[in-house]
Image (cartoon, rainbow, N blue to C red):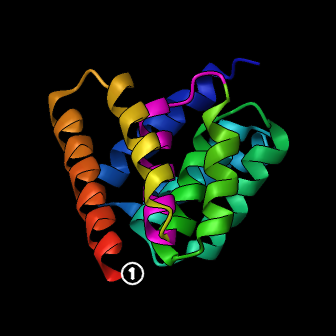
């Protein structure tokens, strides 16, 4: 289902967000919900604004889950919701959404695998974290991303060595 006219309004709202006109952007996006309440991409964008540009994470979570409900094949809300849980230290839920999203068509594999690696690292499963960081690095074609992932691998290897000497 292509809703080009809604996508154009969503782009306008996104540009307002980048101009720090969050309330105006949310007004446009929420008005669009009256026209097309079941458009997953719209719910994802609204969730994105709430998550990254307001202090209303509960609304972000609701919109990401709504996006998933309307289009379970759309990867973006899985990434955002996974990151939200990861940043809150809720690693099991983060992993659940990130692992589901990783296999969706059009998923940003590098981002998903990096966040999954972070979740495993923070849970103390260093071996699995390294596996995901290595896989993400193999999928990356960006120099900065590649360097960041290499640094994550080095950090995990150091942690693994430290843990070996603790026992």
Give the class, few, some or many, for how many residues have Cα within 10 Å of label 1's Cα (few <14, many ≥20).
few
Secondary structure of the residue carrying tag 1 is loop
Image quadrant in which you'd find residue 46:
bottom right
Horizontal side of 29 relative to 127 (left or right) equals right
Residue 26 placement (x, y as % from top left): 52, 59
Is 58 left, or right, of 115 in this rendering? Answer: right
The stretch in magenta equals: 105-123
Give the residue pinned by disc 1: 167
97 or 68: nearer the viewer: 97
Q: For the point 76% across and 45% down, which residue is it? A: 68
Q: Quadrant of the C terminus?
A: bottom left
Q: Position of residue 41 (x, y in %)?
A: 64, 37
Residue 60 higher or lower than 19, as above or below: below
58 or 131, nearer to the observer:
131
Is residue 44 at all visible to an observer of this figure? no
Q: Main secondary structure of the magenta part?
A: helix
Write the residue at 51% across / 54% down.
48
Q: Is 109 one of the magenta-colored residues?
A: yes
Q: Is residue 5 magenta?
A: no
Q: Is residue 143 above or below residue 145?
A: above
């Amino acid at each position: 289902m292509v809703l080009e006219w809604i996508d154009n309004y969503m782009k306008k709202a996104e540009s307002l967000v980048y101009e720090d006109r969050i309330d105006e952007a949310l007004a446009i996006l929420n008005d669009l919900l009256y026209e097309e309440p079941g458009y997953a991409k719209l719910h994802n964008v609204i969730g994105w604004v709430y998550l990254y540009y307001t202090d209303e994470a509960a609304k972000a979570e609701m919109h990401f889950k709504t996006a998933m409900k309307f289009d379970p094949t759309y990867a973006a809300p899985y990434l955002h919701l996974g990151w939200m849980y990861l940043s809150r230290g809720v690693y099991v839920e983060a992993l659940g959404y990130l692992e589901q999203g990783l296999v969706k068509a059009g998923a940003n594999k590098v981002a998903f695998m990096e966040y999954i690696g972070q979740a495993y690292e923070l849970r103390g499963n260093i071996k699995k974290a390294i596996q995901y960081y290595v896989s993400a690095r193999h999928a990356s074609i960006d120099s900065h991303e590649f360097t960041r992932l290499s640094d994550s691998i080095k950090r995990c290897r150091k942690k693994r060595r430290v843990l070996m000497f603790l026992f």
